[in-house]
Image: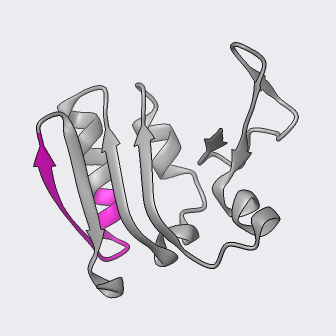
Amino acid sequence: AFNLNENVACSERLEGDLQTHPIPEIMEIFGLKKIDILKMRVNHLENDTFAASNLSFLEVTRCVAFTASSESGREIICEALDKHGFTHFNAGKLTICINKNLI
């Protein structure tokens, strides 16, 4: 599993004993230079997650698909992605964002 908030230590455990890692760390561990599709489900932490995180990985991410807990949460995520060159559209509850810089 991954987290966007680098303030969460890698050794910190979540419910169900699931270990999380920041996305940039996962990319480094596996030698990834780009992300083609990133699917996320964000539950009520949109503002904290996208306001305080290192989102530099978005520069090499082609597509982000996510579900948010509310319309205001969706707007927070879309605003953050817009700053990194993404355009977005809705497909039911799923929001799909495409990085215009990587098309």
Which image quarter is the C terminus in? bottom left
Instruction: Tell me what residue is drawn at x 70 percent, y 65 percent.
Output: 27
- Which sits in the foreground, 102 or 3? 102
Query: In the image, what residue occupies the spot 26% across and 81% down?
Result: 100
User: Quick one: 30 or 54, which is closer to the camera?
Assistant: 30
Q: Is residue 16 left or right of residue 44?
A: right
Residue at x-position 60% and y-position 61%:
54
Position of residue 84 relative to residue 12, above or below, is below
Answer left or right for 45 relative to 8: left
Q: Quadrant of residue 67?
A: top left
Residue sitting at the far right: 11
Does residue 85 appear left or right of residue 44 in this picture?
Answer: left
How is the rendered protein coloured? Answer: one colour
Q: Position of residue 101 (x, y in %)?
A: 33, 86
Image position of 37 with respect to 86: above or below: above
Q: Residue at x 31, y 77 (%)?
A: 85
Residue 45 in picture, x, y percent from top left: 46, 31
Magenta stretch contains residue 90: yes
Residue 91 % position (x, y): 12, 44
Where residue 20 sits: x, y (%)?
A: 73, 37
Q: Which residues are magenta?
A: 79-91
